[in-house]
């Protein structure tokens, strides 16, 4: 089976967090087209777990115009590349103030493969100690709280957690625990 082939590319937009490019492509049947791709660096999502408690963050998500609960997650600024475990520890500390004695990789996610090259790693953080968060300026409205497993699952069922990466990470967590 053939694949879509890039014949040319041009950068349309760039900032500290992403690059948008437009590719001229040739499809397997020989027809041509255009594909827009959002390039973002690898992200890390962390499930902070203390027994039956899980730490979530809530923040205003501008593109949705809504506040949303999710697991701590993100990329390094200025499109830097960090090792996934190092990035996970950074995001955990930055968003929640938590430090973990153990960070275990649960799996990998393709964040939005129909439009973005971004891939993400999911980690389980345990042996947690509390400290001061180190949030970025854009995260100034963020707050975090502990929830029980039953509360997290109720929030997923009832639409309190709609972040696709957080829900996929929860599935990885459940598979890891089974």
Image: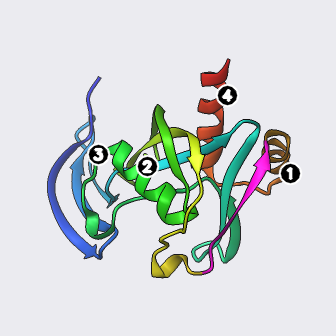
Q: Reply yes or no: does residue 24 show up in magenta.
A: no
Q: Secondary structure at mark 3?
A: loop
| Marks 1, 4: nearer the viewer | 4
Q: Secondary structure at mark 2?
A: helix
Do the CB atoms of the residues marked 2 and 1 lie less than 8 Å apart? no
x, y (%) of residue 54? Answer: 70, 46
- Rendered position, 143 above or below 4: below
Do the CB atoms of the residues marked 4 and 3 lie less than 8 Å apart? no
Kindly identify which residue carries mark 4.
Answer: 174
Q: Quadrant of residue 68?
A: bottom right
Say which label, 1 or 4, has the lower sequence index. Answer: 1
Q: Which residues are magenta?
A: 141-148
Say which label, 2 or 1, has the lower sequence index. Answer: 2
Kindly identify which residue carries mark 1.
Answer: 158
Say which label, 3 or 2, has the lower sequence index. Answer: 3
Q: Which mark identifies residue 44?
A: none
Say which label, 2 or 4, has the lower sequence index. Answer: 2
Is residue 3 among what the camera can see?
A: yes
Kindly identify which residue carries mark 3.
Answer: 83
Q: Secondary structure at mark 1?
A: helix
Q: Which mark identifies residue 88?
A: 2
């Amino acid at each position: 089976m053939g694949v879509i082939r890039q014949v040319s590319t041009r950068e349309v937009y760039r900032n500290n967090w992403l690059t948008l490019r437009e590719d001229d492509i040739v499809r397997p049947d020989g027809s041509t087209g255009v594909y827009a791709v959002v390039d973002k660096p690898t992200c890390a999502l962390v499930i902070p777990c203390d027994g039956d408690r899980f730490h979530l963050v809530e923040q205003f998500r501008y593109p949705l115009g809504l506040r949303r609960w999710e697991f701590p997650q993100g990329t390094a600024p200025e499109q830097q590349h960090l090792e996934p475990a190092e990035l996970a520890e950074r995001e955990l500390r930055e968003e929640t103030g938590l430090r973990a004695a153990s960070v275990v990789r649960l799996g990998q996610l393709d964040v939005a493969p129909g439009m973005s090259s971004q891939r993400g790693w999911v980690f389980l953080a345990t042996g947690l100690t509390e400290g001061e968060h180190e949030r970025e300026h854009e995260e100034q409205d963020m707050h975090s709280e502990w929830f029980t497993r039953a509360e997290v699952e109720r929030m997923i069922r009832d639409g309190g957690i709609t972040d696709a990466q957080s829900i996929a990470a929860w599935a990885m967590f459940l598979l890891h625990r089974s």
